[in-house]
Image (cartoon, rainbow, N blue to C red):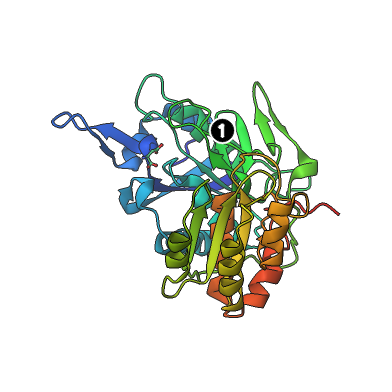
Amino acid sequence: MKQTNNEPRRTARILLIYTGGTIGMGLNPRTGALEPLDFNELVARLPELHDIPAGVDVHQFPQPIDSSDMNPQLWGRIVEIIADGYDHYDGFVILHGTDTMAFTASALSFMLENLTKPVILTGSQLPIHQLRTDGRENLITSIEIAAARKPDGTPRVPEVCIYFSGKLLRGNRSTKINSEGFNAFDSFNFPPLADAGVKIVYHDELILHPDYSRPMTPHFALDANVVVFTLFPGIQEATVRYLLATPGLRSIVMRTYGSGNAPQSPWLEQVLNEANSHGIVIINITQCAAGPVEMARYSGGFLLKNAGVLSGYDSTVECAIAKLMHLQGHTSDPEAIRRLMARPLCGEITIEP
Ligand code: ASP
């Protein structure tokens, strides 16, 4: 956006990266279906943006996508755009479809090491040009958060976050919980970093502190040889064996019951033991939305521990997948991956002492 003498002083420069999603879609009058629009036009038609004390440039994906088509190559592209503009901009706002936003936010949190600037993902449930859209507030507040600084000039939120419906959530703690309501995201195991009502109230004590004396390091290597499987009563040995025999498979996110429990079947222990001894990393994540895995609590969890399954602590599934892809992209040593899965790298898990 160009600045004239009548406009507020732009104190921060923000790069808006438009990847697609409902927020920028319009109705095709012929088919009645939603399809991506040119976002530069939409920004020009949003007069509110001129009142924000930030200069906003737009980088649009050549072909905006529905976020169901997001993939690790495109995560790399987003990281490249951020790394290229890193010195020029004070913060980044990524417009993204809600369906896979939590995966992208998780991946970016690992790919942007020692992030010293805000990267805020947002989107909407209704396209931005519709009368009742939630996109206008989500976008404007995200820009405001990306531009916010502390009195010492450092950014208020130097993290990858999702802003949606009044809540600023740590990206790698977020999950999409609603396909219709405006409150599309939640973070069950970590409180919001900020609440936006009449004022934006930041919870500074929860926000990460990067090392400002070190540069941000972008990472691009990802290895997507991960699989997720969910336990259910009656799960068959043959199915699990088939899954574990997938060529190239390096890790499993196993969605267990309650505090990390599984049926006490000798075959399950044996199959998992075999996978483990072949260097496959197995991470235990509960099927519950809230609460951590505690494998020593019941014998069904103890069995998994004996089979070499690692606790995923209170990680989301989205985050466990992204972290495994990131670590697998950087090392071929399963022991190194196991070690790093048990350590928070950017606020993604809580380990009780
Ligand atoms: N299917 C859309 C997407 O994820 C939904 C949305 O944007 O909310 O791109």
Quadrant location, the N terminus = top left
In the displayed orientation, state which residue is furthest to the left: 30
The image quarter containing residue 246 is bottom left
Residue 159 visible? The answer is yes
Along the line of sight, the residue nearer the viewer: 325 or 267: 267
Along the line of sight, the residue nearer the viewer: 215 or 4: 215
Residue 87 visible? The answer is no
Q: Is residue 248 left or right of residue 145?
A: left
Which residue shows up at 57% across the image and 80% down it? Answer: 332
The image quarter containing residue 130 is top left
- Amino acid at dot 1: Thr
Q: How far from the left and from the top, in percent, is residue 215?
A: 67, 67
Q: Secondary structure at mark 1?
A: helix
Which residue shows up at 75% across the image and 49% down it? Answer: 298
Quadrant location, the C terminus = bottom right
Q: How far from the left and from the top, in percent, is residue 252?
A: 54, 63
Q: In this picture, is 210 found above or below 274?
A: above
Q: How far from the left and from the top, in percent, is residue 266?
A: 61, 63
Which residue shows up at 68% across the image and 36% down it? Answer: 192
Q: How far from the left and from the top, in percent, is residue 132?
A: 41, 19
Q: In this picture, is 307 found above or below 277?
A: above
Q: If the picture is divided into quarters, which one holds ligand 1?
A: top left
Q: In this picture, is 131 found above or below 10?
A: above
Q: How many marks can you see? A: 1
Along the line of sight, the residue nearer the viewer: 189 or 311: 311
Instruction: Please name the residue that numbered disc 1 is placed on.
Output: 141
Q: Residues within 10 Å of mark 1 (few under 14, many from 20)?
A: many
